[in-house]
Amino acid sequence: QVHLQESGPGLVNPSQTLSLTCTVSGDSISSGDFYWTWIRQPPGEGLEWIGYTRWTGNTYYNPSLRNRFTISLDTSKNQFSLKLPSVTAADTAVYSCARSYCRANTCYYFDYWGQGTLVTVSS
Amino acid sequence: EIVLTQSPDTLSLSPGERATLSCRASQSVSSIHSAWYQQKPGQPPRLLIYGASTRATGIPDRFTGSGSGTDFTLTISRLEPEDFGVYYCQQYGDSSWTFGQGTKVEIK
């Protein structure tokens, strides 16, 4: 069974950097068939896809988020990470990592999700 | 960017009733890249339907997905108490995912 778990600070000061890590068990992030993804959900709002990384290290981000995020992976720890510098209150959200099912350079759906972690931006 | 618009925003129904949820895309999308999720408070979304009409593992047959092009539908034939929550449609295209804003199915 695949399991994803987010970790990181629950409170970040405005203008500081948000850093989260997703630890994957039950699957290797080096396997070629999946994209490892971050998604966020502001309180009371809907889901917003942030971006993904693949085992090759390639990344792709939601164009509407203006290249604010950086996603990286650490295959030795079977983890992938998210960084967002210069946060504001508008970045307060539940941040979730997920595995997206992909084949032949196209993707279909998210089959496994982490529980999500609430990150609050406040001084 | 493809925009997904779900309707209605809220559906108030009683257990045993039929629920019909709609998802409309701003341009035609591939059915194989569309999906539906259920989310309950404090939980991550749960995959219900992929490829527009294929139920995910363990999903009861009262959930049915249909549609193509710009219009997709999720039907719950007879609502069970555990079916109340928020439902999201999703599509993948041009290397990006988008979600609808969600439809809340609540107990009447």
Image (spheres, coloured by chain):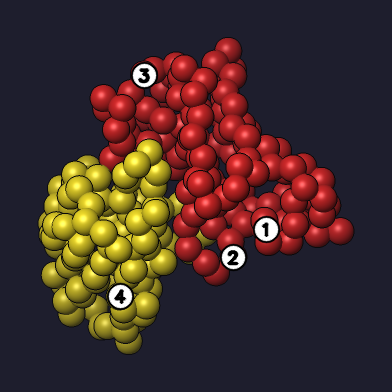
Chain colours: A red, B yellow
The x, y position of residue A15, in whole percent, is 82, 50
* Chain under callout 4: B
Residue ID for mark 1: A92
**Residue type (three-letter) at the residue carrying disc 4:** Ser
Foreground of the two, B2 or B32: B2
Whether labels 4 and 2 share one chain: no
Label 3 – label 1 distance at C-alpha: 32 Å
Relative side of B35 to A10, left or right: left
Q: Which mark is residue B86?
A: none
User: Which element type, helix, strand or loop, lies under badge 3?
Assistant: loop
Looking at the image, is A79 positioned above or below residue A17? above
Label 1 marks a residue whose chain is A
The type of residue carrying mark 2 is Pro
Q: Is residue B54 visible?
A: yes
Count of marks placed on residues: 4
* A25 relative to B14 in the view: left or right: right
- State the residue at coordinates (51%, 29%): A59
Q: Are marks 1 and 2 in contact (CB under 8 Å)?
A: yes
Q: Nearer the viewer, residue A68 or B75?
A: A68
Element under label 2? loop
Q: Which residue is mark 4?
A: B7
Q: Image point 31% across, 36% down: which residue?
A: A107
- Which of the numbered marks, if any, corresponds to residue A32? 3
Identify the residue shown where x is 25% and y is 83%: B14
Q: How crowded is the residue under tag 3: few (<14 C-alpha within 10 Å), some, or many (20+)?
A: some
The amino acid type, in three-letter code, at marker 3 is Gly
Q: Residues within 10 Å of mark 1 (few under 14, many from 20)?
A: many
